[in-house]
Image: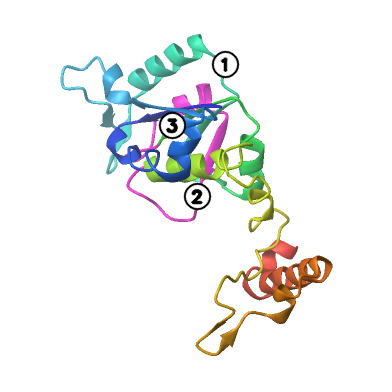
Amino acid sequence: MRIDILTVVPQLLESPFSASIMQRAQDKGHVEIHVHNIRDYSTNKHKNVDDYQYGGGAGMVLSIEPIAAIVEKLKAERTYDEFIFMTPDGELFEQAACNQLSLKQNLLILCGHYKGVDERIRQKYITKEISIGSYVLSGGELAAAVVVDAVVRLIPGVLNDETSALTDSFQDNLLSPPVYTRPPVFDGMAVPEVLLSGDFAKIEAWREEQALERTKQRRPDLLK
């Protein structure tokens, strides 16, 4: 998979992709992540990429020209399965979308900034709009990092245990059950006996029961 990210603050994306699973995924060749500075495509001598909005109002808006320039350049080099815009008014990002995007080959992501982007960019280029929650960040960079992390970890070979991602919360509309590790007793609190039994059928049944109960208590909306 190849992921290209367009941003006015590329520094915000350096750390999330340079350590842990994301770095290993790149080292193994499972994903290429390319971050592009929109300012590099500005024809303004001051490298401005924003302007006042028509009709007045507070806040600046990302301009059309530099974004269109970089998009046309990238599209001439390859075909993108999705061009994603990170925006608070986008579709709420959930596990089903992660699964779908993990099957794609080329993704292009635009990080919103300021008061947003000229609407004509959305009309002309964007194929999918994503929000990671009902709140507003300073820009779309951190949201883009969340999306990339959630998608890349699902690519076969990225995780050491490929079944791990399949048992994550939300994969089957259930939250994950409780998990335990050594020691078997800590401060008087013991690991459930069934997990020490070695009876994998009983263990699996216990986990399914616990997952359902936890979902009922914490996220009953998922069961609908």
Q: Is residue 129 above or below residue 88?
A: above
Q: Earlier in the sequence, mark 1 or mark 2?
A: 1
- Crowd tier of the residue under label 3, counting other residues whose Cα lies within 10 Å: few below 14, some 14–19, many 20 or above: many
Label 1, label 3: how far apart the Cα atoms are: 16 Å
Of labels 1 and 2, the one closer to you? 1
Residue 130 image offset from top left, x and y in percent: 53, 42
For this rendering, which residue is in front, 1 or 126? 1
**What label does residue 79 carry, if any?**
1
For this rendering, which residue is in front, 22 or 107? 22
The residue that disc 2 covers is 132
Query: At label 1, which amino acid type do we have?
Result: Thr
Residue 193 image offset from top left, x and y in percent: 71, 81
Residue at image position (57%, 47%) is 93
Using the rendered image of the protein, determine whether residue 201 is visible from the camera's viewpoint.
yes
Under tag 2, what secondary structure?
A: loop
Q: Is residue 81 above or below residue 140?
A: above
Using the rendered image of the protein, determine whether residue 54 is visible from the camera's viewpoint.
no
The residue that disc 3 covers is 110
Q: The magenta stretch spans which residues?
A: 112-139
Q: Is residue 195 above or below residue 58?
A: below
Of labels 1 and 3, the one closer to you? 1
Q: Earlier in the sequence, mark 3 or mark 2?
A: 3
Q: Main secondary structure of the magenta part?
A: loop
Under tag 3, what secondary structure?
A: strand
Residue 21 image offset from top left, x and y in percent: 48, 43
CB within 8 Å, label 1 to label 3 = no
Q: Earlier in the sequence, mark 1 or mark 3?
A: 1
Query: At label 2, which amino acid type do we have?
Result: Ile
Under tag 1, what secondary structure?
A: loop
Residue 72 image offset from top left, x and y in percent: 45, 13
